[in-house]
Image (cartoon, grey):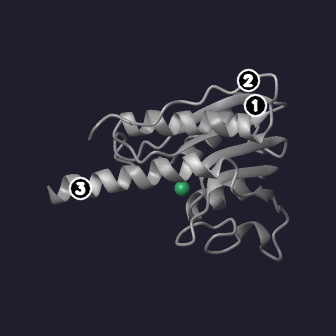
């Protein structure tokens, strides 16, 4: 696999808005690509500070559960010394899968922001809405399409390159 053709985004730290935090998640997606992983990155934010960050590691760890969100959530809970993450925000470049969507609810994460939606496997609005289970007592706020363009482009390009390599 060729190294990632995308450039990291360096947003100003003065404006800590969703685009700022998603830029960090996007930069982790680039790191994932360069580690030969599917380019998805995630950061956890608490009181406007990034407290954990990760990219996909399913290939290097040979672990189907080693998604960026799962790793970032575990690290954040350890750091705060609390498994309840109501005061946290998760930023992830692609809409969480069933496992990760489930983890965001189990962890009681307050707000979730994602870049690219996933109509096949996304469970926070794309394929289904796990965050709106009628009888669940935790319903996180979900914000889609934050910095969507680069988050989408990097995944498309990654799989296109992979297909070309396979067929070559
Ligand atoms: Zn996942």
- Return the residue nearer the eye: 152 or 133: 152
Residue 116 appears at what percent x and percent y?
60, 57
Q: Depth check: 122 or 65 in front?
A: 122
Q: CA distance from mark 1 to mark 2?
A: 26 Å
Q: Which mark is residue 80?
A: 1
Is 132 or 34 nearer to us in this picture?
34
Quarter placement of the N terminus: top left
Circle 2 is placed at which residue position? 12
Residue 131: x and y in percent read 75, 66
Element marked by disc 2: loop
Q: Earlier in the sequence, mark 1 or mark 3?
A: 1
Q: How many other residues sit within 10 Å of disc 3, few (<14), some (14-19) or many (≥20)?
A: few
Question: Mark 1 touching mark 2, by CB under 8 A?
Answer: no
Return the x and y of residue 34 as percentages of the image width and height. 37, 34
Q: What residue is pinned by disc 3?
A: 164
Q: Is residue 12 above or below residue 61?
A: above
Specify whether 105 is left or right of 123: right
Quick one: quadrant of the C terminus?
Answer: bottom left
**Residue under the point 28% across and 37% down:** 2
Q: Residues within 10 Å of mark 2 (few under 14, many from 20)?
A: few
């Amino acid at each position: 696999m060729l190294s990632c053709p995308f450039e990291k985004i360096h947003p100003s730290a003065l404006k800590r808005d969703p685009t700022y935090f998603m830029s960090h998640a996007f930069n982790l997606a680039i790191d994932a690509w360069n580690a030969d992983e599917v380019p998805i990155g995630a950061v956890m934010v608490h009181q406007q500070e990034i407290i954990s960050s990760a990219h996909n590691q399913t290939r290097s760890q040979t672990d189907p559960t080693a998604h960026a969100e799962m790793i970032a959530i575990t690290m954040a809970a350890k750091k705060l010394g609390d498994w309840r993450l109501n005061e946290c925000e998760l930023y992830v470049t692609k809409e969480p899968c069933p496992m990760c969507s489930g983890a965001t609810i189990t962890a009681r994460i307050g707000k979730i922001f994602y870049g690219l939606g996933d109509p096949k496997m996304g469970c926070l609005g794309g394929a289904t809405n796990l965050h709106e289970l009628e009888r669940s007592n935790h319903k996180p706020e979900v914000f889609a399409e934050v910095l969507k363009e680069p988050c989408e482009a990097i995944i498309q390009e990654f799989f296109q390159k992979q297909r070309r390599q396979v067929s070559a």
